[in-house]
Every structure is written in structure tokens, then in C-alpha cells.
Image (tube, rainbow, N blue to C red):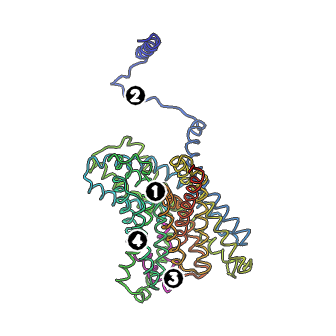
Amino acid sequence: MRYGTFVSTYKIQRSKLSYNLLTPKPDPNNKKSLRPERINASLRDVYALLAPYIGVRIKDQLQAVVPLALYLGLFQVFVLDYPIQEATVLCLGLVAVIIGLAVFMEGLNSGLMPFGNIIGTNLPAKAAMPVVLVVLGMLGVGVTFAEPAIGALQAFGSSIDVMKAPYLFELLNNWTLPLVLMVGAGVGFAAILGTVRFIYGWSLKPLIYVSVIPLGLLSTFFWLTPDLRSILGLAWDCGAVTTGPVTVPLVLAIGIGIANSAGKGNSSLSGFGVVTLASLFPIMAVLLLTLFVYSQITPDQIIGNAAAVKDAVSSQVSVWEQTPLVEIILGVRAIVPLVLFLGFVLFVVLRSKLTNTLVTVYGLSLCVIGMCIFNIGLTYGLGAMGTQTGEGLPGAFIQTSLVASSPIFSNLVGIIVVILFAFVLGFGATLAEPALNALGLTVQKLTNGAFKKEMLMYSVAIGVAVGISLGVAKLVLDLDLATLLLPLYVTGLTLTALSSEEFVNVAWDSAGVTTGPVTVPLVLAMGLGLGKAVSATEGFGILSLASICPIIAVLTMGLLIKIQQKSKSPA
């Protein structure tokens, strides 16, 4: 033993001995001596401890919500000359969105994610592969219910005109629960297929072809069937709604854990692909559910029952929207079943324990509280603001009762102004997504700096901006969604065939990064408000266009980088 080590060891032992001799031992018979000494902290000390912890978590949500809210408000007041209605309620709702998301995300990281990590690591070792896949499939349904944005999708059923879109009305009013279940089943199947892909190292390209080509054929059938055409926007938007802050990290954690247990998780591509599949299979699930409804009931029957149904729905919506207690109930209903299922898998199937039960319970409590606060903010803040702006947008180019000085511009100039508004909205909302920055850093590392973080972020942001602009143009100019979507997906498949596996994985997953819990409800509400104002059949479809355009943008950028590298390298 060296002298320095000996002296250090001696000092430590002597300090321990001094502590043991000088520190009074607790008396087992005296209960007061067994209690830990109470720490006295002033309010200033508590603030100094909690301020950094809370501030970091609020910051991301402030960056995502505040710029968008300011942009919408300023555009509405100064360009559309349309005063903000119920400004106090809107501001309180936006505050609730910020606080709710911050609390929910903290709960997700400290409460739900430990479940995902432990289950993903232990499930393959303690259960047969069929059991593993069944658990993953059921998990897909659970995480879909827990997605913050799925509530926004369910809330717009009453705004659909049954005469123009009978099956869309039927699906969003009488088949709401089966709709969410089918979307969840699509996510579950994507999780199963993505995990099997991790284990066997399958390429993502064939899975994209196998998924998109049948979707294109089925969408063509819907497009050619007048009664079903209005479903396309809802179905393709569902693919964007599902890839949110709950589905992606939780399913990914379990999938990568299973791949690591199988010894196949060290690839640089591990983790990519699940988001792509989780955004494609829900579309197929909604289309298949619609075909079933189509076989069970005719449009005349839907319209015949519409009066009674609409009265019931409108009364239910008015009660539910005006009662914050119901938003709290919806928040609890979204999280608690998922937690119970994860607990059953962990404690009963795997017979495992949590590493830190107290922290996990704390995190799960934050998840429930955050979801409840977010639901209230969504109803009174984010959704209301998007609807208000969407209803005021037509005042730029046509006369409306909401905007006193409408039309503000000529028809052509007004339409251009509205489309430019949508472009800036999409660009800013995308750059505000925290997940996009993380994806950019990952891609820059995987490509050894060839595809820089800023290049990816701006490619995705421009793609989303173009997609939202196309979606708004579709509503304003009354264009068919299929005539926009099908050529774009043909372009995407062509670029996929020409691109390398790395860029394909990144590009197709980048679409899921852009559809966060702030962007989805806001764009949905704006699209439906705009669609209602211009008497469109429905306001869905903007999110679907905002998903395919960034894929094309990233694949194009990847090909340009590849060409540039070839031109620089020696022959």
C-alpha cells in the first residue's frame, strides 16, 4: 500500500471512529430519538431549491406556446382586424396548457418511463415471445388513450355537418370509442412490427412500401366513393395525432429494451422506424373501421337519426365543455388504465419491482395532474384560440359577419396572405418543438457531421410549413385532399427508393417529431374553424399534409448531400 493511500485510509477510519464516539446513539426505547432531525428551511431556501427545477421544465413549454399564441393574436388583431374574444379566459387557458404540459412531461419522465425501461429489459427474459408481442399490442391501445392530442380529435364531432359528411359525423359522434380503440390497435401493431424489426434487423424500406401502397389503393377507393371521401382527412390526420410525447418514448423504450436483450440493439439505426409505422397503421385502422360502418348503416339512416343524435351530442358537449370537473375526469381516465396495465405487467407477469417506488408514484401523480390541467387548457385556451383564428381568416378575402371590415384584401391577395400566414405558423411551430433539436443532434452524430443539425431542422420546418400551407389552400380553394396526398406519397416513395437506409429512417421518422401536443390541437382547431367559416365539408387533412412534406424535404436534402459528397470524393 502506498503511503498516501495509507494516510487517507487512516484519516477516514479515524473520522468514522470519532463520529461514532462523539455522536450520541439513539435510544431504542425513546421514539423521539429515532425520528430524523427536522430541517428548518425559510421560504427563500425553498424558492432557491425549487426555482431551477421548475424553471427548466416550464421553459420548453413557454418556448412552444407563447410565440405561437403571440403570432396568432397579433395576426388576428392587426391583420384581420378581428378583436380577440374572451381574452382573459384564453390567457388563463394558455397558462393551463403550459403548466399542464410541464407537469405531464415531468411525470412522464419520472413515472411512466421507468415502467417502460424495466418492462423492456425484463420482458424478453421472463416471458415467451408471443406474450411479449401481446403486451406490446395492448400497450399501443393504452398509450393512444393517454396521448394529450387524442382528446382534441374527439372534441370536434359536433362541428361536422351530417348532410355533407354523414359517415364522418357518424364516426366522430357514435363511434368515438371504437375509433380510438382502432387507432390504438394500429399503434399496437406498429409497436409489434417495429420490435420484430429491431430483433431481426429488417430494412425499413420494404415495410414502408408494404404499408403505403395498400393505403394508397384504399384511399383511392374512398376518394372514388362520394359518401366516404370526407373520411380521408380524418384518417390521414390520425396518423399524425398518435405520434406524440407518450407513444414515442414509451413504445421506443420497450422496443429498444427488447432489442438490447436479444443482442440486436447496438445498431446506429436502433430506435428509428417505430414512429413511421405508428403513424401509418392507424390510418389503415380508421379506413377499415369506416368500411365496417359503411356496411352496417346507410347515409339516409345516419341523416334520419341526426336530429336526435345532434341534440344529444350538443347538450352533452355543452355540459362537458363548461365543466372543468369533466376535463379532470377525462385526464384521470386517460392515464390510470395505462398505469394499471403497466403495473399488472411489471408486478404480476414479470414479478419485478420498481427501483424507486416513491419517485415513480410521484411521477405518476404528476402525469394525472398534468393531463387534467392540460385538458382544461386545451378546451379554454389552445383549441379556442385556434378555432377563433380559423373562423376569422376568411375575412382576409371574403365578407364575413365576424370581421367588420371584411374583405380586408382583394380575393387573390387575401388568399395569398392566408397561405403565407399558414406557412409562417408551420415554420415557427416546428422550430419550437424540443424533440426536433434532439433529433437533429442524433442525425448529425450518426452521419459524422455530413447532415448538420441546422440542415435537418430547417428542412423539416420548411416541409411542415409547405404542408400546412397546402392544407389551408385545400380548404380555401376547396381542393380534394386525395389529389394532393397521392402525388406527394408517390414522390416520397420514389425518393425513398433512391435514398440510403440511414436517410430513409431519419426522414420518415421526422414527420412524427413535428406533431407535438401543442401543434396538433392548434392546427386541428384552426383547420376546422376555417373549414366551417368557408363552408367546407370538413376541416381535416392539414396534419396529413404536414406529415408527408417534411419527409420529402429531408429525403431531398439527403440526396443533395450524397451527390455533393460524391462530387468532392476522388474518382
Q: Which residue is mark 3?
A: 161
Q: Which residue is mark 1?
A: 501
Whether the magenta-drawn stretch holds residue 34 is answered as no
Mark whose residue sits in front, 1 or 2: 1
In the image, residue 218 above or below residue 558? below
Question: What's the magenta region?
Answer: 151-179
Residue type indicated by callout 1: Glu
Residue 443: x, y in percent? 52, 51
Between 181 and 89, the one lying in front of the other is 181
Residue 282: x, y in percent? 41, 67
Q: Are marks 4 and 3 in contact (CB under 8 Å)?
A: no
In the image, residue 217 above or below residue 119? below
User: How far apart are the alpha carbons under marks 1 and 4?
Assistant: 24 Å
Residue type indicated by callout 2: Lys
Mark whose residue sits in front, 1 or 4: 1
Can you tell which mark lies on residue 74? none
Residue type indicated by callout 4: Met
Q: Which residue is mark 2?
A: 32
Q: Residue furthest left?
A: 128
Q: Earlier in the sequence, mark 1 or mark 2?
A: 2
Can you tell which mark lies on residue 284? 4
